[in-house]
Every structure is written in structure tokens, then in C-alpha cells.
Image (cartoon, rainbow, N blue to C red):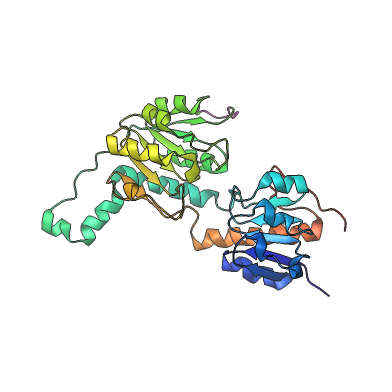
């Protein structure tokens, strides 16, 4: 009996490949270029992906039913086109929530207290040679933290922040019921009310470069920006200028506009902490994400529904 064929364009966690191979026939192409789709791939009915799925790739696969995305963010998938074609799209929420929230707090502390720089001071022998590491100019003490985005991950970050005794506020499209955190209807208003802004919104057209020069100016010269969402949300040029000129005091970034390229100007700044998009990058969490990718595909073909469909594609499988 022929097995269901699953296309994997580009790289993905090896656990996805290994688990898919137990139940399906895995078809691999170098990247998500529709020109790489051959006539022998016309019966592919599922895609497992960590990255892009353009509309043209969907169109090149006439039997495609489901796209299982590795990650909670699915901005690489042309979702409107998938929805219009009746193609289900799933992502991997929840399983990475706590890991990303942990990383956000770690990045915040690294940025404020300059802990990576202090470690390098020790490793380079400067403690014994030059004396104590300089006092960090910033601290978490007495800060007001604003969350731009209050979904699963944002709420987990907020719960952690409560233990630090800081005030917490947030901005989303509409206020959330049952929360004691102060709500601000505009992002500029939130930035003006706090001195620490944590960005944890998806990368969409609506959020693109919303953290701009105006928002950074409102954050103020004691302000710190932390981004563990998507690089597209921050106007990177405006951020660099704000950091260079003292408009804000510092930034901690796990994501960038043109990954994996990071501007030299950011790399040169002493008041930033930079990570290579590792918020969910532990073996435990990535294994859980890989499992959910495969489980979504298995469940789709077994029951006609994905386990974690994205809101735009709440589809059930049509009989064939």
C-alpha cells in the first residue's frame, strides 16, 4: 500500500524527519522553491516546515491538505492563501511557552546587569589583573515593565515578573478580563508609562515596525527594550539610532529583521545583549515542538482534524 507523502522543504528538526518516516513517506527538497516540485510529487498531501511556505508552493501541490509549522509563529506561511484554498495550517503553541518566557527574563537580566560582559571580564583574567567589574548602570529594582502582547507567552512572562516585585502593564488590541495589570490602548502610551518594554507579538503586517522612533522616545533615556517575538516588529534602524544617541539606555534582542544577519552597528554597541534566536532552543522544548508537528499531521489523517490549528484555518478534512 502506498504511504501518505509528506514534503519537507529545507531544514527541520531531525526528530520530525525520524518520526514522520515511521508512518509516512518523506519527500525532501532543498528549500521552498516551487520549481523544485517534480511531477512525482503531485500526490503530496502534507508539508512539515520550519520556515517559508509561499503561495506558489501550495499551488504546485494540488493534493495538499495540511501544513504543519514548526514554531508558534507562522508568518512564513502565506496564511491567507492557505485559508482560501482550504489548506489547514497548524503550529506548535504551549509546548514552547515556558522556555521562551524563561529566556525573556534571562535576557532582561543580562541586559540590565551586563552579566555576559561580567563573565567575559572574569574569563579574560581581568578580575585579577584590573580589579572588580564596573558597576552595572541599570537594575531591575524599581522598574515598570510593559508587555507588548499578552498571549500565552506574554502571560507567562508577566507571572515571572510578579515575583520580582516590578509593576506590570500591557498593550494589546483590546483589554483582557480578569487581570490586575494596567492596560494601555496605544503602544506609545504604554512606552510612556514604563521604562522597560518587552515585545512578544507575532510578526504580521499589523505589527511590522510598530516599535518605532516615537515609541522608543516615549520609553525614555532610562528605557530598555527586550524583543523575543519577531525582528520585524522593531524598526531596527530607529533602534540603533536610539541606542547610539542615548534616547534609550539599552536593549536585549533574540530576534532581528534579517536573520541570521545582525547589523554591525548593533554588534558594536556596549549597551545591548544579543542572542541568536534561541528563546525556545533547548533539546527538551525542541523535541516537544517536533512531536507536535508530527502529531498534527498524524491526527489530521487519522481523525480529520489538526490538534493545534491556527485561527485562520479551523478546517476539518474533506472526504477524498
Q: Main secondary structure of the magenta part?
A: loop
Instruction: Tell me if residue 171 comes above or below residue 292 in the rendering.
Output: above
Q: Please name the residue shown 53% across and 61% down the image.
A: 284
> Does the image show residue 164?
no
> Does the image show residue 201?
yes
Q: Is residue 52 magenta?
A: no
Residue 20 in picture, x, y percent from top left: 68, 68
Judged from this view, the residue extending furthest toward the bottom is: 1
Left or right of residue 311: residue 265: left
Report the span colored magenta: 175-180
Q: Please name the residue shown 39% across and 48% down the image.
A: 106
Q: Please name the residue shown 55% across and 43% down the image.
A: 203
Instruction: Tell me if residue 50 comes above or below residue 201 in the rendering.
Output: below
Left or right of residue 66: residue 149: left
Q: Please name the residue shown 44% across and 46% down the image.
A: 104
215, 222: nearer the viewer: 215
Residue 320 in picture, x, y percent from top left: 87, 58
Instruction: Tell me if residue 233 comes above or below residue 262 in the rendering.
Output: above
Residue 197 in picture, x, y percent from top left: 42, 35
101, 40: nearer the viewer: 40
125, 98: nearer the viewer: 125
Residue 152 in picture, x, y percent from top left: 57, 42
The quarter of the rendered structure image containing the N terminus is bottom right
Amino acid at each position: 500500500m502506498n504511504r501518505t507523502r509528506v514534503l519537507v522543504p529545507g531544514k527541520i528538526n531531525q526528530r520530525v524527519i525520524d518520526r514522520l518516516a515511521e508512518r509516512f513517506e518523506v519527500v525532501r527538497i532543498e528549500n521552498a522553491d516551487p520549481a523544485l516540485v517534480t511531477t512525482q510529487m503531485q500526490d503530496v498531501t502534507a508539508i512539515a516546515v520550519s520556515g517559508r511556505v509561499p503561495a506558489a508552493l501550495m499551488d504546485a501541490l494540488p493534493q495538499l491538505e495540511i501544513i504543519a509549522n514548526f514554531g508558534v509563529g507562522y508568518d512564513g506561511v502565506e496564511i491567507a492563501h492557505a485559508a482560501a484554498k482550504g489548506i489547514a495550517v497548524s503550529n506548535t503553541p504551549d509546548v514552547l511557552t515556558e522556555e521562551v518566557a524563561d529566556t525573556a527574563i534571562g535576557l532582561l537580566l543580562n541586559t540590565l546587569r551586563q552579566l555576559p560582559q561580567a563573565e567575559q571580564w572574569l574569563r579574560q583574567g581581568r578580575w585579577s589583573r584590573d580589579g572588580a567589574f564596573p558597576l552595572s548602570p541599570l537594575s531591575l529594582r524599581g522598574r515598570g515593565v510593559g508587555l507588548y502582547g499578552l498571549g500565552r507567552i506574554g502571560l507567562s512572562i508577566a507571572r515571572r515578573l510578579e515575583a520580582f516585585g516590578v509593576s506590570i502593564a500591557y498593550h494589546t488590541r483590546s483589554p483582557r478580563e480578569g487581570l490586575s495589570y494596567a492596560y494601555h490602548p496605544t503602544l506609545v502610551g504604554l512606552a510612556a508609562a514604563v521604562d522597560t518594554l518587552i515585545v512578544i507579538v507575532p510578526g504580521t503586517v499589523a505589527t511590522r515596525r510598530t516599535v518605532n522612533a516615537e515609541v522608543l522616545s516615549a520609553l525614555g533615556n532610562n528605557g530598555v527594550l527586550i524583543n523575543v517575538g519577531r525582528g520585524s516588529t522593531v524598526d531596527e534602524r530607529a533602534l540603533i539610532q536610539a541606542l547610539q544617541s542615548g534616547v534609550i539606555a539599552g536593549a536585549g534582542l533574540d530576534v532581528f529583521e534579517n536573520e541570521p544577519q545582525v547589523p554591525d552597528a548593533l554588534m558594536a554597541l556596549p549597551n545591548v545583549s544579543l542572542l541568536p534566536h534561541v528563546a525556545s532552543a533547548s533539546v527538551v522544548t525542541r523535541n516537544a515542538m517536533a512531536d507536535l508537528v508530527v502529531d498534527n499531521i498524524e491526527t489530521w489523517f487519522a481523525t480529520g482534524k489538526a490538534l493545534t490549528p491556527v485561527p485562520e484555518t479551523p478546517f476539518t478534512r474533506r472526504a477524498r
